[in-house]
Image (tube, helix red, strand yellow):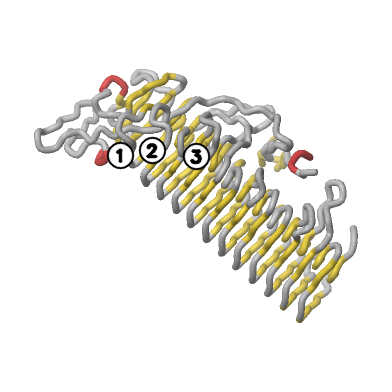
Amino acid sequence: MGLRGVLAENGANVTVIGNVTSDGYGVYADGYGTRIAVIGDVESKGQMIDTDAFSAIKSENGADVAVKGNIKAMEFGGFGVYAEYDSKVTVTGNIEASGDGILSWGSAVTVTGDVSTEDWQAIESYSSSNVIVHGNITATGGDAFGVVSFNGSNITVVGDVATQDVGVLAGGDGTSITITGDVVVKNIFNPNFKSGVYADYNSNIKINGNVTAISGNTNFYGVRALGGSAITVTGGVNAASFTVACADGKTETLVGDVVMKNTLIEVDGTISGNKKNIAIAANGGEIKLDSVPSGALATIDGKNNILLDPSNTVQIKPSHLKGYITYTDSTAKPSGFVSVKMANVLDTRAPNPVTPTPSPAVMPDNTPLPGGSVDTGDNSRRWMWAVGAALLVDGAFVTMQIRKKYLVKK
C-alpha cells in the first residue's frame, strides 16, 4: 500500500547513510533475513486512509530494521514504528507520531530515546511482544493513552510517563509493564478504565516512581486492578479528590467470561485522595498500603465507611498479613481486604493485631486508607477499548484481538 522510501524484502539487505523522507512508508522491510539499516533520520508524511495508517518504519514477517536517528510521522494517524509477525526494530533516537508511537504485534522493539504521540497510544503492544524504551513517554492528545500492553506482551519504560488520559494499561495472562519513573495523568475521563493505572485479567504492572492521577470525576481511581491482576507502586499515589486504589477480583473487560481471582494493589509510598472513600476492595481483592491519612475510610465489597484505624477492632482480620493491620467487611466471611503497614499505624502493638497494646509513651498513629465504589463504565466515548485476551482453549492458542474499529480514530 502506498509509497515506500526504502523497500527490502525476501532476504534483501539495504544500508542507507543519510535521511529518508516519504509520502508513504519511510522504511518497509518484509521477510525473514531481510534487513534495512539507516544512519540518519526517517520521516513519513503519509496520512491515514480509512483505517490504514502509514508509518515511518514498517517491519513484518521476521524482518529487521535498525535506525540511528530520529523517527517522525506527524501527519494525521501516522505511526512511528509498526512491527508485526516476529520482526525486530531498533531505534537509536526519538520517536514522534500523530498516531501510535510504537505498535507491535508479536515483535521486538527497542528505542534509546523518548516516544511521543499526539492522539493515540505512545506504545501499544500485543501477542507476546517485547518493547523496551530507554526514555520518557508523552501522550499529549485529549484522549491519548501512554503505555498499553495485551496478550502476554511485555513493556519496559526506563523513564517517566506523562499523558492526558490513562497512563498505563495492561490486560491478559502473562502481560507485564514496568515503569522505572513517575506516571502523571492530567485528565482521566475514559469511562471504561476510569483510572490512571489499570490492570485486568492476570496482568502485572510495576511503577517504581510516583503516580499522580487527576480527574473531574470523583468515581474514578488512581490505580485500579481487576481479575487476578497485580499493581505495585514503590512510590506514592496522589489521586486528588477521588479514590486512590480499587482492587476487584472480578474480570470486567473480557467478553463473554467472568473470572474471580485474587487481585492485589500495593503502594509503598505516601497516598492522598478522598479520605471518605480512599480504597475499594471487592470479590477477593486486596490492597496493601504503607500508610493512610488520619480518619480515612474504605469500602469493602459494598460495605462503606470502614475506618482504617486500630481502634476499629471489630473489622480487623487477625494475622491475615504479617506486618500489616488488615481491615475487612466481615471477619467471619471476608470479601476483600485493606491492609496498612503496622509500623505506620501503631508503633507498639502485640503480635496479634486484634488486640492493640498502646502505652503512654507510644500511642496509635491514627492513620487510615482510601475507598470508592465499583461501577461499570459506559461505552459513550468516541472510541473504546475491548481488551484482547490470550487463552488456552482445548490446547489451542487462541488470540482474541478485540482491538475494535473504534480504536482507530477518524
| Disc ID at residue 223 | 3
| Disc ID at residue 70 | none
Of the numbered discs 3 and 1, the one sitting upstream in the chain is: 3
Label 3, label 2: how many angstroms apart (C-alpha)? 12 Å
Q: Residue at x 57, y 37 (%)?
A: 200
Crowd band around label 2 with a 10 angstrom C-alpha radius: few (<14), some (14–19), many (20+): many
Q: Residue at x 69, y 70 (%)?
A: 70
Q: Residue at x 59, y 43 (%)?
A: 166
Residue 10 visible within the image: no
Q: Nearer the viewer, mark 3 or mark 2?
A: 3
Nearer to me, 64 or 369: 369
Q: In x, y percent, where is residue 265?
A: 45, 39
Q: Amino acid at mark 2?
A: Lys
Q: In x, y percent, where is residue 302?
A: 46, 20
Q: In x, y percent, where is residue 25?
A: 83, 63
Q: Check the image and report above or below for 279 versus 182.
A: above
Which quadrant is home to the C terminus?
top right
| Disc ID at residue 341 | 1
The image shows a total of numbered marks equal to 3
Label 1, label 2: how many angstroms apart (C-alpha)? 8 Å
Q: Verify CB contact (< 8 Å) between mark 1 and mark 2.
A: yes
Label 3, label 1: how many angstroms apart (C-alpha)? 19 Å
Q: Check the image and report above or below for 252 versus 143.
A: above
Q: Residue at x 40, y 39 (%)?
A: 272
Nearer to me, 343 or 152: 343
Q: Verify CB contact (< 8 Å) between mark 3 and mark 1.
A: no
Quick one: SS at disc 3? strand
> Which residue is outermost to the front?
216
394 to the left or right of 410: left
Q: Amino acid at mark 3?
A: Val
Q: Amino acid at mark 1?
A: Lys
- Residue of label 2: 288
